[in-house]
Image (cartoon, helix red, strand yellow):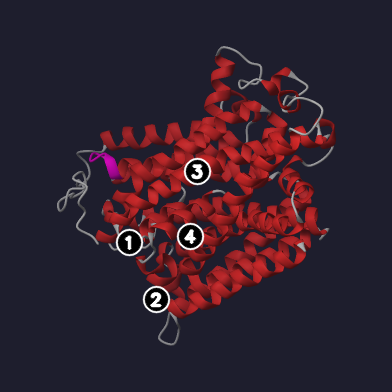
């Protein structure tokens, strides 16, 4: 039964891709769905894309490995999601349409009159580097789930997922991605709400008390501070909460704000997204804790803790429901991978101007963009195969990519929208600082023991933008912010 449900689901999303293809006739359609997405589709698409393999596999696995200290990640992520929608979405939607920008690098270049092309080039390279890791993590996660449930070899599972994602992404662009994300977002929230509730009810029938079942054997994992005190406890809390900083700078999430039909619709979409995030993120944490209570800690000794969710679903639920929820898990990976493929494609075709290089009188710009999508998908696929062979964890790979993207673009986006003294050189400094600090910090075990690269790189990048902007105030032509003011709440776009 699980196999039948899963096959039907995959058939459905391919059908959506084929149907969406009829509505794609331009770069605007392919990359931003013609800026016609409604609030429900936008909100669910952003949430499904934001919470990838790491949420349904990585976070439950981390809850088992780390214990209750992982609650800080839950808090940070929830705050980050809500803050991004309330601080960035409306202003970014308004300004990107005003500047006729299809991508984040294009927006930053036009806003700061960067005739040198440095902002666009640096941004595109950052996206290309870190999304390679990110997309490979999604393919890797899909292989892990298919192996757990169907006994398919992980390498074959990775191949199957990659083929499906590439097909419906090149067919329908962001429109196909957004509508499949709506379906995937519904399945994901169902998984994250239903599974821990069913698990808790099942644990109540055990001989031991619920509190005893949900406790770990060691006090370090029972403590929200990992058994530490003083500076150590602060480091644990900040490290977990730093996940929230990444939401300000993820290009595959920011394009959802740019693609919504109107600024007015964002007022609805941000509340939908917030109401998804609160039970969704906490539910993922509880999946891990419930798995420990049901299977016992000893069950996971020597096993991959990131398979907790599919194992729990398969054990506790009827086959057809388990099939739907497991499809939701694969949905989480696909919804992120497809969005990242689109953003990477736009970075290559639009921001590195590859379309102009390969374009001639007889070529089709949209067709070239689709070819670029295929090439990037195959490149990410090869990286996923490498990750499977080397045994890298989804949680670790996503943490690195999340930090690189969030710290490079987050401070730049926030300050470009909210601080009028931001300069072109400040943006360039922030982009470089965020990416370089992530690479250096993420490569050092000692530095990571002090504080995670997610926090350090964001803080250093933010300081870099502010400092260099102040130093170059009189050396650059200030950005002309004339026109409608955003503070009033009336943006003049419908």
Instruction: Count residues near mark 2 (Cα–Cα under 10 Å), then give few for <14, some for 14-19, many for 20+.
Output: some
Q: Which is more foreground, mark 3 or mark 2?
A: 3
Residue 418 on the magenta span: yes
Q: CA distance from mark 3 to mark 1?
A: 28 Å
Q: Residue at x 50, y 33 (%)?
A: 76
Range drawn in magenta: 417-421
Residue 132 badge = none
Determine whether label 2 and label 1 are within 8 Å by CB.
Answer: no
Specify the farthest residue to the bottom. Answer: 362
Helix, strand or loop at disc 2? Answer: loop
The mark that comes first in sequence, 3 or 4, is: 3
Please state the horizontal and vertical placement of residue 494, each as a whole percent of the image: 25, 62
Residue position marked by numbered label 3 in the rendering: 277
Q: Residue at x 70, y 37 (%)?
A: 201
The mark that comes first in sequence, 3 or 1, is: 1
User: 410 or 71, which is in the foreground?
Assistant: 71
Q: Which is more foreground, mark 3 or mark 4?
A: 3
Helix, strand or loop at disc 4? Answer: helix
Q: Residue at x 31, y 50 (%)?
A: 90
Determine whether label 3 and label 4 are within 8 Å by CB.
Answer: no
Q: Which is more foreground, mark 3 or mark 1?
A: 3
Instruction: Count residues near mark 3 (Cα–Cα under 10 Å), then give few for <14, some for 14-19, many for 20+.
Output: many
User: 52 or 273, which is in the foreground?
Assistant: 273
Residue position marked by numbered label 1 in the rendering: 101
Residue position marked by numbered label 2 in the rendering: 26
């Amino acid at each position: 039964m699980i196999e039948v449900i899963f096959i039907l689901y995959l058939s459905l999303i391919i059908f959506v891709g084929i149907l969406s293809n009829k509505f794609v006739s331009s770069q605007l359609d392919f990359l931003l769905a013609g800026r016609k997405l409604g609030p429900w589709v936008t909100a669910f698409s952003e949430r499904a894309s934001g919470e990838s393999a790491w949420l349904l596999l990585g976070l439950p696995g981390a809850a088992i490995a780390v214990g209750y200290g992982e609650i800080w990640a839950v808090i940070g992520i929830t705050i980050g999601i809500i803050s991004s929608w309330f601080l960035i979405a409306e202003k970014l939607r308004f300004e990107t349409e005003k500047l006729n920008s299809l991508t984040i690098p294009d927006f930053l270049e036009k806003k700061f009159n960067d005739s040198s092309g440095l902002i666009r080039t640096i941004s595109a390279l950052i996206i290309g580097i870190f999304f390679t890791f990110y997309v490979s993590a999604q393919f890797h996660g899909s292989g892990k789930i298919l192996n757990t449930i169907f006994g398919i070899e992980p390498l074959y599972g990775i191949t199957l997922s990659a083929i499906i994602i590439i097909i419906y992404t090149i067919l329908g662009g962001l429109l196909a991605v957004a509508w499949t994300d709506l379906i995937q977002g519904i399945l994901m929230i169902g998984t994250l709400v239903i599974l821990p509730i069913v698990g808790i009810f099942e644990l109540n029938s055990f001989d031991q008390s619920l509190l005893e079942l949900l406790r770990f054997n060691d006090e370090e994992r029972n403590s929200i501070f990992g058994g530490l005190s003083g500076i150590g406890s602060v480091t644990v809390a900040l490290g977990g909460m730093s996940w929230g900083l990444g939401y300000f700078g993820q290009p595959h999430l920011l394009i959802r704000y740019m693609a919504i039909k109107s600024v007015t619709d964002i007022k609805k979409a941000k509340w939908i997204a917030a109401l998804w995030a609160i039970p969704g993120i906490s539910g993922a944490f509880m999946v891990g804790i419930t798995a420990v209570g049901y299977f016992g800690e000893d069950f996971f000794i020597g096993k991959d803790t990131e398979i907790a969710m599919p194992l729990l679903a398969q054990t506790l639920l009827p086959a057809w429901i388990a099939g739907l929820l497991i499809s939701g898990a694969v949905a989480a990976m696909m919804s992120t991978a497809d969005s990242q493929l689109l953003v990477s494609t736009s970075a290559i075709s639009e921001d590195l101007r590859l379309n102009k290089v390969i374009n001639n009188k007889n070529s089709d710009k949209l067709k070239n963009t689709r070819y670029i999508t295929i090439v990037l998908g195959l490149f990410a696929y090869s990286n996923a195969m490498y990750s499977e062979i080397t045994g890298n964890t989804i949680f670790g790979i996503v943490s690195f990519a999340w930090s690189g993207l969030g710290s490079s673009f987050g401070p730049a986006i926030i300050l470009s929208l909210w601080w009028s003294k931001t300069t072109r050189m400040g943006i360039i400094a922030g982009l470089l600082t965020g990416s370089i600090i992530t690479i250096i910090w993420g490569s050092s075990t000692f530095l990571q023991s002090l504080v995670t690269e997610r926090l350090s790189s964001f803080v250093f990048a933010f300081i870099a933008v502010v400092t260099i902007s102040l130093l170059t105030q009189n050396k650059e032509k200030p950005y002309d912010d004339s026109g409608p003011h955003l503070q009033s709440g009336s943006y003049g776009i419908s």
